[in-house]
Image: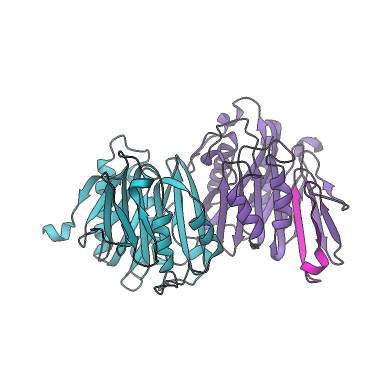
Chain colours: A purple, B cyan
Amino acid sequence: MCQLMGMSANVPTDARFSFTGLVQRGGGTDIHRDGWGIVFYHGKGMQEFKDPDPGVDSEVAQLVKLHAIRSKTVISHIRHANVGDVNLENTHPFSRELWGQYWSFAHNGQLKDGAHLELPLGRYTPVGTTDSEHIFCWMLDQISRAFPFKPANPDMLWQGVASMADRLHNMGVSNFLLSDGQVLIAHCSNKLQWITRRAPFGEARLKDVAMTVDFAAETTPNDIVTVLATEPLTVGESWTAMEPGELIVFNEGEVCAHFKSLRRLL
Amino acid sequence: MCQLMGMSANVPTDARFSFTGLVQRGGGTDIHRDGWGIVFYHGKGMQEFKDPDPGVDSEVAQLVKLHAIRSKTVISHIRHANVGDVNLENTHPFSRELWGQYWSFAHNGQLKDGAHLELPLGRYTPVGTTDSEHIFCWMLDQISRAFPFKPANPDMLWQGVASMADRLHNMGVSNFLLSDGQVLIAHCSNKLQWITRRAPFGEARLKDVAMTVDFAAETTPNDIVTVLATEPLTVGESWTAMEPGELIVFNEGEVCAHFKSLRRLL
């Protein structure tokens, strides 16, 4: 199993604190030694850093930890490989363009053996051999078929993503983070937690590294910053565990849509 | 006008020497202050570093200069903006996936005013506002229409790219580097030079920075490394200037196909 980290904020925010905690699990405090990646959105553009080396040893991860990259939307992943070799093309997050926007996807879980092959592909083809990239290519192709152009009202789109997430949830374990650069969509199969920080800001201490941050000194009173992670990155704060089958759409740090698993409603 | 740098080699090769010379032109010895980017292929995977800040000041460029990233195929670009604002989404190289391969494109030149809008788009949509990204999306869409699947014999594909390059050459200035991760395709409208280094290797000195490298100490006798650049990066070596309308396909450091402008043959 891999670990996910995501951020959605209403102002460009430095994600180093969370990334430092996550990357420590890449071979330091945990077993996720099979590569890591992070995507930062800046307007419509995207900056991507990836390395098939363990996060804890990686020089590129070192740069990302030292360099204050401020972004409103971030997706990160550290990998413990189950399907697919350890190499760059199998390193999350995966990215593709649709409607002139870069979409990114990171995934934690595993479908039942070979089940991803039932998901038909179209205009997007996986470059690597992970089930995760196959799932992403399938989802984006389905979206592009349902919506040849970007829908003016995104509700139907999110409903469509929730319904695909539900199908995946029925095929095995599938926690994921998906972004079009504006919203951050989080789906929980069995493990995903989140926290929204807003004024009055307090202090937080990382769980995996001796590091404390005083958010009050780093933010303005209007900042709203949501962080998601497979497991809480900090101690002394109250994270919310998502329920199995739950999907939340975050925009500018706030929940803007919320779906429960259809399976649970039946 | 921007500056291009590309590398094609038969073994994973450290491109820092060439990159260091190029990046110096990003606000140091030249005016290309509007961002820079570099793509390294590793097998089917791709590592991309981009920054809308001047290369000479960029912390990310500093990392790329310090960190020995070895690759067989590299494309890099420093930008002096003419069409499109200075921001991340307008920073070259641009990338898209086709046939399960990441394609990358960097461009130097300018078509006649608004001429790129005559080039119809299809499955790929520009994220930014440069004519360069529009050209790339058009080219890849044309390729995907002509070849829904990757052709077993690439000759027809390269012929198709040469014919598109010729059309662009007739619409203005269009020097470009294009790669599918395996081959590096170089087209010259007015400015592109290349050099192939092979045994016996000698020394070279950068033009833009006080830096010398003894390639004999860095290579094995079987290495073949071709470097392309808008203008020679070194002194004391003999670079070959491409002719207007010329297109060369490099594979593993060697020329594997060569096209002259149709216009010149008429």
The span shown in magenta is A206-230
Q: How many marks?
A: 0
- Percent from the top left, x then y, of residue B33? 46, 72
Give the residue furthest to the top: A113
Residue B125 seen in render: no
Q: Residue at x 24, y 65 (%)?
A: B170
Towards the viewer: B217 or B28: B217
Towards the viewer: A101 or B211: B211
Q: Is residue A222 within the magenta segment? A: yes
Q: Is residue A223 within the magenta segment? A: yes
Q: Is residue A118 left or right of residue B202?
A: right
Q: Is residue A187 left or right of residue B256?
A: right
* The C terminus of chain B: image quadrant: bottom left
Give the residue furthest to the left: B266
> Which image quarter: residue B9?
top left
Q: Is residue B19 left or right of residue B197?
A: right
Q: Residue at x 42, y 58 (%)?
A: B19
- Percent from the top left, x then y, of residue B29? 40, 73
- Percent from the top left, x then y, of residue A147? 56, 51
Q: Residue at x 61, y 57 (%)?
A: A40
> Which image quarter: residue A187?
top right
* The N terminus of chain B: image quadrant: bottom left
- Percent from the top left, x then y, of residue B109? 33, 67
Q: Is residue A105 left or right of residue B88?
A: right
Residue A122 seen in render: yes
> Which image quarter: residue B23?
bottom left
